Amino acid sequence: MKKRWFALLLMILIVPLAGELKFYPFDSEFSSFRVSFGSPAFLFFLLWQRSTSFVFSGLLVGLSVLVFRMALDWITIDSTIASSLLLHMPAFFYYVVYALIFQLAKAHDLYNQPLGIGLLSIIAEITASMLELMLSLTYSSATDIIAFPIISKILIIAVIRSFFILSFFFIINLRHAELAAEQQREQNKHLLMLISALYEEGIHVRKSLQNAENITRDCYNLYKDLQDCHLPINQNQLAQTLLGIAGQVHEIKKDNQRIYASLTQLISEKKLHDYMTASELAEIIIQSHQKYARSLHKTITFDLQVEDLLPPLHVYTVLSLVNNLVSNAVEAIKDSGLIKLSIYSINENIVFRVADTGPGIPQKKRSLIFKPGYTTKFDLTGNPSTGMGLPYIKDLANSLQGSITLEEIPTDKTVFTIQLPLQSVIKEG
């Protein structure tokens, strides 16, 4: 909105000034008709401001040109208001009619058709100029006739002025398109590199999972051998088995170190696009969980409250913390309910507050929810969840010198609050 009003202000200042760079193509009673840079400047602003009504722009510019020229007359030649108004009123109607033609022709639909815009601007120029000439003759009580030579001059001037400004406008548009395409190529390149790196780490994860499976099987076999105490235990064989298990554990450790180092590098590069406003992040969280709720056939309303003056936040840190809480809230609500996400600051801290109208957490279980492995969620086959979501959030919050708390609410609501130092999630400097 601010940019729109700034562009309008720029237009009503520049067009009257550009109108003073002029020459007079006709003699005799048409001598007051001027050709200036005001019209090309106005055409450029009409093309630039796609969200503003053409007629509104024409009225604004027409009034600004009229007032500017009358003020100039009053300063330079001490003209009366009435005579100055009659002299410059045709210019007011010129800009209004010019804009009205663009409005009636629905010029917004022609922005991707340079020839269509060019033809429309020529028609608008000729029509508005002819009207300005006729009004000038009327106000001056002249008897001259607008003959073909005059019309041909107006046509030539209209073509030249329209061609000049359209060439300039579409060169700017072409440059913007090139910059956008270059930015898109860079984003695609970054995305391909990211996918490539993740694919490589996926291979390491698969290998690590296989090692874990082998360890599980070897440990189980060793357990069975030790349980069968009536069998003689071969000490060397036992030592070799334990050494093999230790080697596989070491291999998993090395794989995890490589994966951790790679992923840390991927998500900790301090680039501009790694930071987003709190509102943008909150919208991402809400939209993704609206889809998640629909996939679970639940009717959940999301309420969002975000403080306006927060600086951009680190995307991955915020999503890692808040996504887990909102996901838990979606899963906790049985069929329908409300989830409220609030993001605000207190002193030098930032607060993420997630409240849901699910069944709540019983008092006797509140002391267990942050323990690794504790869970109340089971899938359709009866297998329990890992119970690592809340412990992970707690560890991450602690590592950032923050905290997570489960608020004591006397109702069935569940409210989690994460509080972090603001400096831990904003861009350095």
Image (cartoon, rainbow, N blue to C red):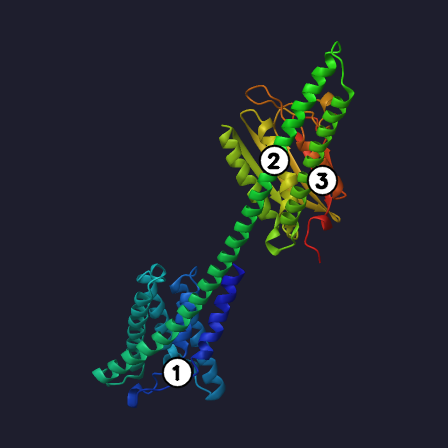
**Within the image, what quadrant is residue 338 found in?**
top right
The answer to whether residue 370 of the structure is visible from this angle is no
Is 93 in front, or is 278?
Answer: 278
Determine which residue is flagged by label 1.
83
Name the residue located 28 percent from the left edge and 77 percent from the top edge: 130
Mark 3 or mark 1: which is in front? 3
**Within the image, what quadrant is residue 132 found in?**
bottom left
The image shows residue 9, relative to residue 328, as above or below, that is below
Q: Quadrant of the C terminus?
A: bottom right
Distance, label 3 to label 2, CA atoms, is 27 Å
Mark 2 or mark 1: which is in front? 2
The image shows residue 35, relative to residue 306, as above or below, that is below
**Local crowd size for mark 3, using a 10 Å CA cut-off: few (<14), some (14–19), many (≥20):** some
**Does the CB distance between marks 3 and 1 fall below 8 Å?**
no
Q: Earlier in the sequence, mark 2 or mark 1?
A: 1
Q: Earlier in the sequence, mark 3 or mark 1?
A: 1
**Local crowd size for mark 2, using a 10 Å CA cut-off: few (<14), some (14–19), many (≥20):** some
- Give me the disc on residue 207: 2
Name the residue located 55 percent from the left edge and 53 percent from the top edge: 190
> Percent x, y for residue 311?
66, 53
- Give me the disc on residue 273: none
**Does the CB distance between marks 3 and 2 fall below 8 Å?**
no
Is 35 in front, or is 320?
Answer: 320
Is 42 in front, or is 230?
Answer: 230
In the image, taking residue 429 as reference, residue 198 lies left or right, namely left
The image shows residue 419, relative to residue 40, as above or below, that is above
**Does the CB distance between marks 2 and 1 fall below 8 Å?**
no
Distance, label 2 to label 1, CA atoms, is 91 Å
Type of residue at label 2?
Answer: Lys
The answer to whether residue 233 of the structure is visible from this angle is yes
- Give me the disc on residue 396: 3
